[in-house]
Image (cartoon, rainbow, N blue to C red):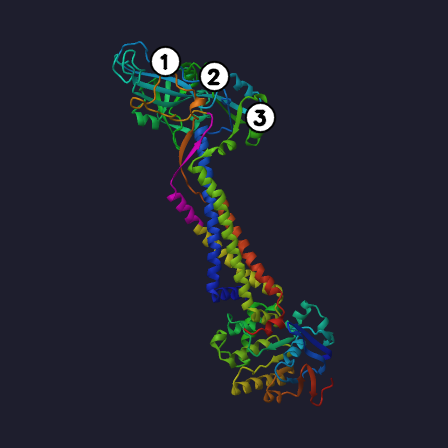
């Protein structure tokens, strides 16, 4: 599914250029669940953003199903994100003025799904994550774990090919963390999705099939089975 | 989703919404009020001009007294030097309206020959000066002059005046009488061309206790009052006579002081003006718009205030309101960077997010416009209710109401020698016409439409800035922001 070759990302700051990724080579197969682990500020999120088409590398290739995300037009990238990528963020990133079901519906709006169908599918997605009794609650009326479940439902409702989760349990307590990562793992197993989880938490990383370690922008240690 | 998101977002940022809406409303309300006040002032100026000119006059033609030329005075008074009668003497004389010399009636025919002239009628502006006093010479040895031969006569005199306008009775729908309406009696008819009849202004009649059927004595001729007339903007002429009568009484046979002209159309006024000036180089040709520039008084000040201060103030306030709306919108977008970044991450196109921001701003604009219309109507109502009565004075060469009245003082005051003559108009004073108008501030559909347009523009301008900001967000940068 993914083939990264020589991916480099540099930022220009007031204090000079910063290299977030330095010549990363990586392959990810269809239906694989991998964890990207490393210290804070070493390029984990940057790598995830390259994989999700949220940012472009300064150099190198990011092939997704044979298409180079780095060379793709913005509108094509947007369409790809709408159909194929589901994001889960550390801070949940729900729209505060929309209810749980409306937040999930928001993921179906770019696909042109009619309103009635959107509502139906969103409600079903929330039921799948155990929130069928919280449809009309605003994010501020939900706990952290519940908000993350809404975010998971939003990521899954469009039936994406890839789930990209950036520290999905980072803001949760231990019990909730386990619930959430178990949920993600179960969904991966049931649906055959490709799941990429960025985490600094080894307990979370252990759930993945393999772990990619990133240190100072370079992938240093790969577990057996990585063909990159 | 669009409307739900829009409505919820406006409710979430109630304070910001209120600030933007109220700011736009104040700016738009001020524009409407100033527009209404300007329209009211323009209406008032039209009323002034029509009360002075009459309705339907496009151009007036007069002939000014040239520098060094002496105007025609009232003619000598004769208080009977050598007459030993001790009676109080009253005499009146007619003099021409200030600052003009009379034109031959044939000038009207010359004007009518011009291609863009539709109608032309003449009028004769006069002032009746009445002097009343006891001119009995003192006995020798008495009086201020002392011994035999004594000093000069120092009479106690009263001088009063009233304005007269001789009008063409065959064309009463043009000229100064056209803006007046009959309140009692009858109007002039064609048969009154040289008859000793008069129409008196209701104001003058009221001041002097005159009524229909009473008699005015003008230079020894009794003139019967057949009707009373009144103008909504105040009476600028005291007495109207048929033109032939006025000419006969004043000795100004076949003379007029003002010719009122109607052009063939509103678009032909300038052409008519040029043609008349070319045919008659010695006359002064004035259009209604040129006369409007001569208006002074509190109405003129109000016009300046509305046009200059009012207009610039409303522009400044409106620009400030737009700037505040734009800044607040951009600030709102900055606070929602992570939110917009998330929407882009889940596949929302930039233009959908821009549409959301523009929609919110447009609602601000429409709410501001609606409130602004209310404020503007209220402001216009207050202007109409609280504005004092304004006066407008036009100093130009046609007879005005009540020329200067001066009374003889105690001995040592103004002395008029026997057989003396009052100074002519060109030397003594300029005639001025003053009318009073009540200012109103009408709110027109044009003003309402302008307000709605401004509201939409305001919303779009503010939204445009915010939308530009939102459209340039990169998802990665947006998600990297920490709130």
Residue B116 numbered tag: 3
Q: Earlier in the sequence, mark 3 or mark 2?
A: 3
Count numbered badges in the picture: 3
Q: Earlier in the sequence, mark 2 or mark 1?
A: 2
- Mark 2 highlights which residue? B255
Q: Is residue B382 magenta?
A: yes
Chain bearing mark 3: B
Q: CA distance from mark 3 to mark 1?
A: 49 Å
Which of the 4 image quadrants contains residue B203? top left
Determine the chain carrying the residue at label 1: B
Q: Height in image: B64 above or below A168? A: above
- Give SS at disc 3: loop
Residue extent of the magenta highlight: B376-397
Placement of B190 over or under B375, stated as above or below: above
Q: Residues within 10 Å of mark 1 (few under 14, many from 20)?
A: few
Left or right: B40, with B416 as reference point: right
Q: Quadrant of the C terminus of chain B?
A: bottom right
Label of residue B419 in the image: 1
x and y, in percent, of residue B313 in the image: 49, 49
- Which secondary structure lies at badge 2? strand
Label located before the other in sequence (3 or 1)? 3
């Amino acid at each position: 599914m993914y083939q990264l070759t020589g991916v480099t990302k540099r930022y220009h700051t007031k204090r000079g250029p910063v290299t977030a990724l330095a010549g990363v080579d990586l392959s990810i197969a269809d239906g694989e669940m991998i964890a990207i682990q490393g210290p804070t500020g070493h390029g984990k999120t940057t790598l995830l953003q390259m994989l999700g088409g949220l940012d472009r590398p300064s150099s190198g290739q990011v092939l997704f199903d044979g298409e180079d995300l780095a060379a793709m037009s913005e509108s094509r990238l947007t369409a790809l994100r709408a159909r194929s990528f589901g994001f889960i963020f550390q801070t949940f990133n729900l729209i505060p003025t929309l209810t749980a079901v409306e937040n999930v519906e928001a993921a179906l709006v770019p696909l042109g799904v009619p309103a009635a169908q959107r509502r139906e599918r969103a409600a079903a997605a929330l039921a799948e994550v155990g929130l069928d009794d919280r449809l009309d609650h605003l994010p501020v009326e939900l706990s952290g774990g519940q908000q993350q479940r809404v975010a998971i439902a939003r990521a899954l409702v469009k039936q994406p090919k890839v789930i990209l989760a950036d520290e999905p349990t980072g803001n949760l307590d231990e019990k909730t963390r386990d619930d959430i990562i178990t949920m993600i793992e179960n969904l991966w197993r049931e649906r055959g999705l490709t799941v990429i989880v960025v985490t600094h938490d080894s307990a979370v990383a252990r759930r993945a099939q393999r772990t990619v370690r990133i240190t100072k922008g370079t992938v240093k240690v790969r577990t057996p089975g990585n063909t990159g | 989703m669009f409307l739900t998101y829009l409505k919820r977002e406006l409710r979430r940022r109630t304070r910001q919404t209120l600030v933007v809406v109220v700011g736009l409303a104040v700016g738009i309300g001020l524009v409407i009020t100033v527009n209404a006040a300007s329209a009211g002032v323009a209406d008032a100026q039209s009323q002034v001009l029509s009360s002075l000119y009459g309705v339907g006059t496009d151009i007036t033609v007069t002939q000014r007294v040239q520098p060094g030329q002496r105007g025609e005075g009232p003619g000598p008074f004769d208080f009977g030097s050598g007459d030993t009668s001790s009676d109080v003497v009253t005499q009146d004389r007619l003099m021409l309206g200030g600052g003009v010399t009379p034109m031959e009636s044939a000038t009207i025919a010359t004007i009518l020959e011009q291609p863009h002239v539709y109608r032309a009628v003449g009028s004769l502006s006069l002032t009746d000066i009445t002097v009343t006093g006891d001119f009995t010479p003192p006995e020798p040895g008495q009086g201020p002059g002392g011994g035999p031969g004594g000093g000069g006569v120092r009479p106690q005199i009263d001088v009063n005046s009233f304005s007269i306008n001789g009008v063409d009775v065959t064309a009463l729908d043009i000229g100064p009488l056209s803006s007046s309406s009959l309140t009692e009696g009858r109007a002039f008819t064609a048969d009154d061309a040289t008859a000793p009849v008069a129409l008196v202004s209701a104001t003058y009649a009221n001041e002097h206790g005159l009524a229909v059927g009473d008699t005015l004595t003008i230079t020894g001729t009794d003139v019967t009052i057949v009707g009373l007339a009144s103008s909504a903007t105040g009476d600028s002429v005291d007495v109207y006579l048929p033109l032939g009568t006025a000419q006969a009484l004043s000795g100004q046979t076949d003379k007029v002081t003002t010719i009122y002209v109607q052009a063939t159309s509103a678009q032909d006024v300038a052409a008519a003006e040029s043609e008349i000036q070319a045919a008659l180089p010695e006359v002064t040709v004035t259009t209604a718009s040129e006369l409007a520039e001569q208006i002074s008084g509190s109405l003129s000040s109000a016009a300046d205030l509305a046009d200059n201060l009012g207009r610039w103030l409303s522009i400044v306030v409106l620009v400030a309101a737009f700037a505040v709306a734009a800044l607040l919108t951009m600030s709102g977008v900055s606070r929602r960077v992570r939110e917009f970044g998330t929407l882009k991450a889940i596949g929302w196109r930039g233009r959908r997010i821009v549409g959301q921001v523009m929609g919110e701003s447009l609602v601000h604009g429409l709410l501001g416009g609606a409130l602004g219309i209310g404020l503007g109507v209220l402001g216009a109502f207050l202007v109409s209710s609280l504005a004092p009565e304004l006066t407008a004075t036009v100093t130009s060469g046609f007879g005005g109401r009540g020329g200067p009245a001066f009374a003889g003082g105690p001995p040592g005051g103004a002395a008029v020698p026997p057989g003396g003559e009052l100074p002519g108009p060109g030397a003594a004073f300029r005639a001025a016409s003053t009318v009073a108008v009540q200012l109103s501030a009408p709110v027109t559909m044009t003003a309402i439409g302008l307000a709605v347009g401004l509201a939409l523009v305001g919303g779009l301008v503010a939204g445009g800035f915010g939308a530009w900001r939102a459209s340039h967000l990169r998802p990665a940068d947006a998600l990297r922001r920490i709130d």
